[in-house]
Amino acid sequence: MSVCTAPPQERPAPGWEHFAHMADIGVRGRGASLAQAFESVALALTAVVISPAQVAPTTAVDIACPGSDPELLLVDWLNALIYEMAARRMLFGKFEVRIGAEGLRATAWGEPVDRSKHAPAVEIKGATFTELAVRETGDGTWLAQCVVDI
């Protein structure tokens, strides 16, 4: 068995992935900063419904979540996105997150759902505390994950 490792000065690229969890699905984001991990996990959330690349970033929506606990902020952030998707009938494919002492402030860019263009796969009901984790990893990157109810 061979193991591939990056040189110590290089960090893994930010990104997202899904992980299996019974009838629901896990969303995970990684980034060079906590904010970037939150942006990546938001892309994973969108990817549960549709490929984020299919969403045109034509309309900006501002979102604020007060608080200082990173794990609670993650659940609040994802639930705020799920609410905005349902209430505005929109999909989001681009995110900018800022996290400070007052909590999270973000902008999500997207477009109204067009069933002929987007053909959404599922509707996400909410982010849960199941497998909730927000932490800095051993290589200096950040990880943010939880399971979402579909």
Image (cartoon, grey):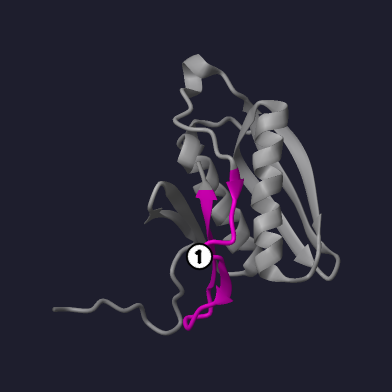
Residue located beneath label 1 in the image: 131
Query: What residue is rendered at 53% in x and 50% in y?
Result: 148
Residue 116, above or below 142: above
Tell me the quadrant of the picture where the N terminus can be found: bottom left
Q: Position of residue 36 (x, y in %)?
A: 61, 61
Image x and y of residue 96, in percent: 68, 51
> Crowdedness of circle 1 by 10 Å Cα count: few (<14), some, many (20+)?
few
The image quarter containing residue 90 is: top right
Residue 97 picture location, percent across and down: 70, 56
Relative horizontal placement of residue 60, taking residue 146 as reference (left or right): right
Horizontal arrangement in the rendering, residue 1 relative to residue 90 (left or right): left
Instruction: Give the residue type that dot 1 points to.
Output: Glu
Mark 1 lies on a secondary structure that is loop
Q: Residue at x 42, y 55 (%)?
A: 17
Residue 51 screen position, x and y as percent: 45, 37
Which corner quadrant of the image does residue 82 belong to? Answer: top right
**Relative to 68, residue 89 above or below:** above
The residue under the point 49% across, 31% down is: 54
Residue 134: say if magenta.
yes
Q: Which residues are magenta?
A: 126-148
Q: Most extreme residue toward the left, as rendered?
A: 1
In the displayed orientation, state which residue is furthest to the top.
116
